[in-house]
Amino acid sequence: MGSTEPSESSVMISEDPENEDEQELPELRIVLFGRTTVGKSTLGGIILGDSAAFTLSDPHGERTKTCHVERKTDSDSHSVVVVDTPGLFKMGSSEEDVVKEIKWATENVEPGPHVFLLVERLKIITSEELKALQVFERTFGKRAVAYVTVVFTHKNDPRGNEADIKEGMKDNEHLRELIERCQWRYFIFNIADRSPVQVTELLEKITQERQDYSDFFYTPQMLQAAEKAANEERSKDDRRRKASENRLAILEKSGLLGIFLGSVVGYFSCGGELTPTSGALLGALLGMILIMGMTFSGICVFEKYHKK
């Protein structure tokens, strides 16, 4: 958390006039994502000043399956928009469905979110906790990681301070990797503390971080570019896989045919008599020569196909 004395006043967000209508209300758009049971909904409610904003039971039971958007506007017309998303890796929910929901949120929180808050519990970080960031990067592109800030949630944990996080990175390579990949953008949030002080600190930190980037928020166009790149990469992987399968098929056919032809040649070279030594050895030798020749031909065909 920040070292400066926090104020409880609202944070003014100065948008780029080339990207947004100057007449629109200044606002900060936040998308929460991460694994299940890490405190996303609770955090979202605290940010909005309404603890029940994302935690009231939905009569249709869809709250945990779909995105939920809430907005808060204060007396000075400063707005905060928070999107709560379904938890990744939740039993009974497919990753594809959750990703679709997060994409929907990104495209419909116009003109785009300023920040994606990756919410994690303040605990030992393992490779499992890194998966949420990996899914995000695979979906939204490497460029989108510049819009991610990690929020470590806890409930009055005495270890919830800057010094303990830095100390933990010495022994926990996964924690270090998570923070480094997000370029040291992280915040420690006590979700048992409902005072506005932490919220002000968090919003100020997000606003300050965005000032370091020319693109102030993540746009639907960035998402489209990421999807195009992902589709192209999948197509390349498919071509590599098919080419590899073809290569194996060619090698198998070449080997079987080489052994058969070698045996036949060896048989007739010995006058039609396969002695225990001469016929078998000659057949094997000729077979190996044929295998090598046909394998070389097969590899040439594979390389020609692979370069297309």
Image (cartoon, rainbow, N blue to C red):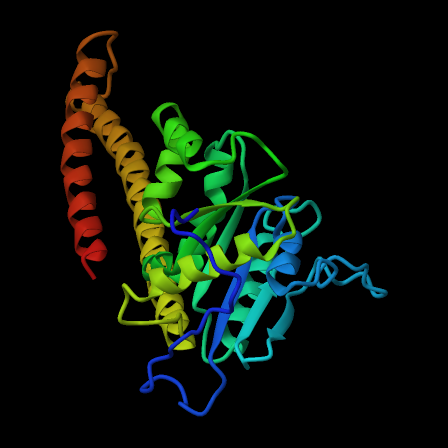
The residue depicted at 63 percent of the width and 38 percent of the height is 155
Q: Which of 214 and 300 is in front in this view?
A: 214
Occupied quadrant, residue 176: top left
Q: In which quarter of the image is the C terminus?
A: bottom left
Q: Is residue 294 left or right of residue 60?
A: left
Horizontal and vertical percent position of residue 1: 44, 46
Q: Is any part of residue 271 visible from this angle? A: no
Using the image, determine if residue 182 lies above or below residue 255: below
Q: Is residue 243 left or right of residue 30?
A: left
Occupied quadrant, residue 41: bottom right
The residue depicted at 27 percent of the width and 38 percent of the height is 251
The residue depicted at 15 percent of the width and 33 percent of the height is 292
Q: Which of 218 and 201 is in front in this view?
A: 201
Residue most extreme to the right: 59
Using the image, determine if residue 28 lies above or below residue 36: below
Horizontal and vertical percent position of residue 213: 28, 66
Horizontal and vertical percent position of residue 104: 56, 71
Q: Is any part of residue 28 visible from this angle? A: yes
Horizontal and vertical percent position of residue 269: 15, 23
